[in-house]
Image (spheres, rainbow, N blue to C red):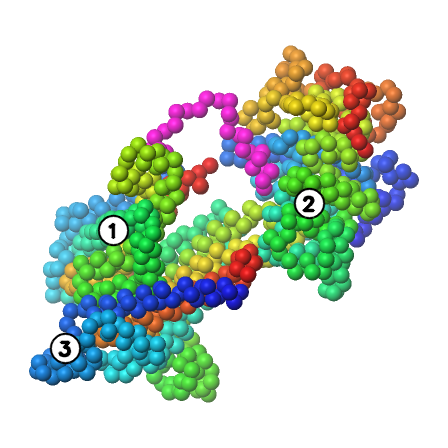
Amino acid sequence: MLNFLFRKLLMIVPTFLGVTIITFALVHMIPGDPVAIMAGERGLSPERHAQMMAQLGLDRPLWQQYLDFLWRLMHGDLGQSLVTHNAILSEFMSRFPATLELSVCALIFAIGLGIPLGVIAGIKRGSIIDHGVMGTALTGYSMPIFWWGLLLIILFSGILGWTPVSGRLSSSFWIDTPTHFMLIDTLLSDAPGAFMDAVRHLILPAVCLGTIPLAVIARMTRSSILEVLGEDYIRTARAKGLAPWRIIAVHALRNAMIPVTTVIGLQIGLLFAGAILTETIFSWPGIGKWLIDSVSRRDYPALQGGILLIATMVMIVNLVVDLLYGLINPRIRHQAE
Amino acid sequence: MTSTITTSTAGTDPLRSSRALLDIRRLSVSFQTRNGIFPAVSDIDMTLNEGEVLGVVGESGSGKSVTMLAMMGLLPFNATIEAERFAFADHDMLTLPDRARRRLTGNDIAMIFQEPATSLNPSFTIGYQIDETLKVHEGGRRRQRRERAVELLDRVGIPAPRKRLGDYPHQLSGGMNQRVMIAIAIACNPRLLIADEPTTALDVTIQAQILELLLQLQQERGMAMILITHDMGVVAEAAERISVMYAGQLVETGRAGEVFHRPRHPYTGALLDALPERHPGQARLPTIPGVVPGIGDRPTGCLFNPRCRFAREDCRQQRPELLTMGEADDPRATTGHADQHQARCFHPLETDVSADRDTGARS
Amino acid sequence: MTQANAQTSPDNPTTSEIPPAPHPLREVWNDFCENRAALAGLIIIALIIVLALLAGVIAPHTPVEQFREHVLQPPFWQAGGSLSFPLGTDDVGRDVLSRILYGARLSMMIGVIVVTLSLVIGVLLGLIAGYVRGWVDTTIMRLMDIMLSIPSLLLAVVVVAVLGPGLFNAMLAIAIVYLPHYVRLTRGSVITERNRDYVVASRLAGAGPLRLMFVVILPNCLAPLIVQATLSFSNAVLDAAALGFLGLGAQPPTPEWGSMLANARQYVLDAWWVVTFPGLAILITVLAFNIMGDGLRDALDPRLKR
């Protein structure tokens, strides 16, 4: 297992270097230089401009600048925001819990609903339930989630008035945020009703972000269950006289989950992309909104750092999924050993 | 385990008991397919007493496995079962509710399959897969069940059984996996074990070992066994009675010795003739030309007539019934239904092969 | 189960005469038509294309004309609505229906351009990687791996940030983001095909590498590419709308569906129609392409055939 982990880690290194090169290159392809952007409309005298360029190391050859960038990166220094002048890493980390909380809830929603729906559709193949679930899944898969979020707001906030329109917590609550996870922080605080308020804020964005993964997981689970139900070992399980629920829940599901895990792993990268749209709609103060704001404020170092961190995280998640895959599939595990 | 232990103790002579362990009359199975209804098996009679071994022989597609899956209740949902009588240990299998039926399957009737490699679940340890049967049917403490599992693995000839409990099927060989399947099947001391081509997928050297193991277990536990195979040689070693199937029909049935020495149906004759033992030193064995007919090309008349060397005009016109073959020298011929030698042929073979070719039946 | 199959498989009567095999394309078309949902998808797509082409004739108004006295007028069946603005008007008094119809033109154009760009470049790179192998292959595939490790919409956002917002740059960004899928798909098929006997035979017959790549190998890799093209058409429509929604794609007053929604966001609780209809147009278009893509995959995938 350790060997397996080590080899996977080794394969990540070139990809990570590639991402650093690409993000570095992208920012340098932007017309205009950072000093001019910082100076804004006022402009600078040529001497002052040259002086600042030298100060920031921007007058050196590109490869030197890249190595410098890499060196600082290894020390956890992603540079400073052009707008707030804060360290980018701390800007990122202060917003990341919000995105993580949203993504985890969206994924729980997608898995918790997608797997049972896929299983039911698979068992009742060809029935009205199957057609209904699959039709809904295809619609969900085709859904423009930025529109879906707006529809949810119209229905649940506008017509029914059940949920707030935006943010993570109503402004009437003023609580400490030691963990930056609002669900945990509200539980830790003694403000009455704060936790339910946080849940109400979270529920629509999570449903919106979870819709496409839900559809993908339901479709994959169904086809995987159908394939597994035709296997010989299911016949053996029936020959043992096991109850139908046990055959599905134990023998079929365990094997059907192997391809589904891979699909769930792929969804995690897409969740970060979906978070951009969802956070914009619901004014959710996370990474996605921060990145879009950075684009409109032309805060390129922030954009560069954000992309780099997200790409790294996606790579780590893929690694974890690979490991999980080995855990649930004994054949892979033994190959690796 | 169940309340019907009476059958084995009631009759003074279990072989002659009118209440057989398994009693099937005119069983038919048909499948609803996209191209219409396809009769897979029609009018099968089968009787089996406690502790008896029945060999069921036939080519692939003859309906052997469908019959057995019907017995286990394992047919797919598009199958329809009809029968005049379909009883196992006095349970009417046609009307038995699913829940009660599941109490029988895996417990009183167990089955092992052709492909040991795919018949075990790849995601669970063999220990878990044995334990599951014990847990569902017998309950008991976990530690006791674990000991039972070790005993079972030991009994089926798996070395270091305690260590093997945590192994996954892909870590064992095909022969070992089949032994595990046997251990699962005999875990609850079944009264009937159905072995569906248990050795076909295995190496030749392993085949004999597995067959030997099955017969030992059968003797030792006094369970009835149905051995399905397309290999006449295998039944010859093992079975007391033989049923030969062709295209979903029973074409010949009788005591093993009689069927072997005096086959009456030309198909049985041809199958026996294809045994290598009967042609020592010959490079080419006789074969039966053609294949078992499918749904679209079932001939009129006797189903075997297109491939039969002896087919005459009436064979092409009418479908023969299963007829009792008169055997003057055998007093059983007129007494018990199960032991009668029957064949579905207008012109049964007359030759007695036992005189010159005795090598077939080695039992 | 297996036994049941064994029993039913001989029901293709071997004795009856075999009808002459239909043309392969004809066969794919027949399989496709058997899937009623896929056919419905195709019909909807045809309808959208017709509407897009005839937008100038059908649309009651031009997409940019502002009727200042009819600002945020509801659709005709609600109180205050009128048939001259069937689906209502937006915040500056433009007709929603007309904007949606002209938007269909843009979306179809976006789909065609993005798919063509990424297909041509992706297939080219894939062919080279799969045919030449060696360090060229490694370099191309590593680059694609790196691109895949950044979530696609995020990568598109970055590319647009570099190139500057606008419809054309958005299309370019999306086309770049879709490249890895085509490259991987083509390379995979080329590697399996290049050692087949027919390829070896053409090589022995003296075919040059270009001929081998484009004339001999490529046609045999087309099926999965066609399916991928259909599915990425719908994704292109979706992603272009997403970029428009984020303000990075088509700029106002272009009647692009995504940017219409971006503009309508602030009226989400007051004027449901400005939000609902453009999104519905996106959903229907994307859904139609996805259904058709699913049907095409089933019809083209030989593994799923009888």
Q: Quarter of the image holding residue B331?
A: top right
The residue tagged 3 is: A36
The x and y percentages for residue B128 are 66, 59
Q: Amino acid at mark 1?
A: Ile
The residue tagged 1 is: C121
Q: Secondary structure at mark 1?
A: helix
The x and y percentages for residue B67 are 67, 36
- At 81% from the left edge and 33% from the top edge, which residue is drawn? B363
Q: Chain of mark 2?
A: B
Q: Secondary structure at mark 2?
A: strand
* Location of residue C186 with respect to C13 vertically, above or below: below
Q: Quarter of the image holding residue A264?
A: bottom left
Q: Is residue C196 left or right of residue A118?
A: left
Q: CA distance from mark 2 to mark 3?
A: 79 Å
Q: Residue furthest top?
A: B313
Write down the region rendered in magenta. Answer: C1-27
Q: CA distance from mark 2 to mark 1?
A: 55 Å
The residue tagged 2 is: B112
Q: Chain of mark 1?
A: C
Q: Is residue B324 left or right of residue A97?
A: right
Q: Residues within 10 Å of mark 3 (few under 14, many from 20)?
A: some
Q: Secondary structure at mark 3?
A: helix
Q: Amino acid at mark 3?
A: Ala
